[in-house]
Amino acid sequence: MHFGFSYIGLIFLIMLMVPNMIWSKNKPTDYEKYQKNENKILLAFERFGEIAVTFLAVIFADFNINKISYWSIILLIAFLLMLLYEIYWIRYFKSNKTMKDMYSSILGVPVAGATLPVASFLLLGVYGKNIFMIIAVIILGIGHIGIHLNHKKEIE
């Protein structure tokens, strides 16, 4: 692992954060009602994971493209998952913005808004061979995907 700025990590974070900033002004109907019921342990995992992943994504140069190799396929898949995440958000913003829209799947990926970025950053950690990122993403995934699955159960 090599410390240094990661432009790839920054690109992934921008792809993650821009739709979330737009979402903050376009939350689904009754979202606050479901938010009140969030499991506090899952919420703690999510918050810790968010901070750790954000920090780690930009401080390790190992996430940058150094040479094209078989490892590059992992980075390409991670990027394609982030593109699918962007498509998920475009679809959500064009919808009626209900809780059902928020927790929809895309191409068979359940709760795509939570699952796609977690899977993408996990692959980024694998690509960079960065155990800290992998652990941080697992913690994030437990919290973030867990919360979203609970919300989905509530609306069904």
Image (cartoon, rainbow, N blue to C red):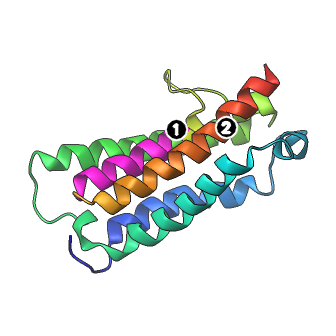
* Secondary structure of residue under mark 1: helix
User: What residue is at 80 percent from the left and 37 percent from the top?
Assistant: 97
Q: Main secondary structure of the magenta part?
A: helix
Which of 87 and 126 lies nearest the eye of the viewer?
Answer: 126
Q: Amino acid at mark 1?
A: Thr
Span highlighted in magenta in the image: 115-128
> Label 2: which residue?
148
Q: Amino acid at mark 2?
A: His
Marks 1 and 2 close (CB-CB < 8 Å)? yes
| Residue under pointer 1 | 115
At x 60%, y 60%, the residue is: 18
Residue 128 appears in view = yes
Residue 84 in the image, given as x and y percentages of width and height:
47, 39
| Residue at 10% from the left image edge and 55% from the top image edge | 68
User: Along the polypeptide, which appears first: circle 1 or circle 2?
Assistant: 1
Q: Where's the N terminus, which quadrant?
A: bottom left
